[in-house]
Amino acid sequence: MPAPADPTVLRPMPGQDRLVLLKPLVTSPLIEVGEFTYYDDPDDPTAFETRNVLYHYGPEKLVIGRFCALGEGVRFIMNGANHRMDGPSTFPFPIMGGSWAEHFDLVTDLPGRGDTVVGHDVWLGYRAMVMPGVRIGHGAVVASGSVVVDDVPDYGIVGGNPARLVRRRYTDADVERLLAVAWWDWPVDHLTSHIRTIMSGTIDALEEAAPR
């Protein structure tokens, strides 16, 4: 019997160099990614940390859960992109150097929105953009080209610029059941035995399949 999928393999699809698992790829201590979360890009998916996570000067983190699907061109804008808006000009003069650099505190003491957090089993569509400090719930779907400026509820579907809630994938009661079963935390061997239930089964069947 074939072994389960390996979360440490950078390119899990033979002959498809455009798809990489992010956990074995990322090196930044400010980025945390769960197992089996992937990024797809026909150009250079291995440049994810520099091309897709922008203005990441810290200390805020980007945290992405397990089993997330990130489409081509997904971008995370981090808090380092912020400019002052409490005075007449938003221009960051101190970064130009010279004597202006004496006022560098004016660009470093900006308030942050905290970590950007993506839950488990989230699908981010083609060229979706996630703004600083946003929290995207488990099982959520973000439509292609969306700009996510506010938190997304568990199993919510959002779209647009700015992204708005289109609908919930499940009722509140069923969302509670899904969060309780938390299939993304199952041991890989057990999960492997129930792939069809996870992908196309009912919540009842998922609960029945959960480890005892």
Image: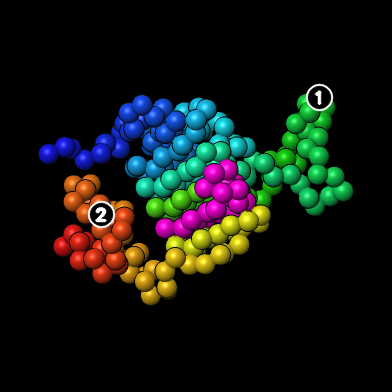
Q: Residue at x 40, y 33 (%)?
A: 20
Single out the mark in the foreground, 1 or 2. 2
Horizontal and vertical percent position of residue 106? 75, 41
The kind of secondary structure element at disc 2 is helix
Whether 169 is among the magenta residues is no
Quick one: quadrant of the N terminus? top left
Whether 17 is drawn above or below 115: the answer is: above
Q: Nearer the viewer, residue 35 or 201?
A: 201
Seen as rendered, the residue at the extreme top is: 98
The part of the chain drawn in magenta is 125-148
Q: Residue at x 81, y 35 (%)?
A: 93
Alpha-carbon neighbours of circle 2 within 10 Å: few (<14), some, or many (≥20)?
A: few
Name the chief secondary structure element in magenta. loop
Residue found at the far right of this picture = 88
Residue behind mark 1: 98
At which x and y percent is residue 111? 66, 51
Q: Position of residue 52 (x, y in %)?
A: 55, 36
**Residue 196 vertical position relative to residue 74 in the rendered view, above or below:** below
SS for callout 1: helix
Name the residue tied to disc 2: 196
For label 1, the crowd category at 10 Å Cα-Cα, with few meaning under 14, some 14 to 19 and many 20 or more, is few
- Is 140 part of what is drawn in magenta? yes
The type of residue carrying mark 1 is: Gly
The residue positioned 18% from the left and 47% from the top of the image is 189
Residue 98 position (above or below residue 71): above
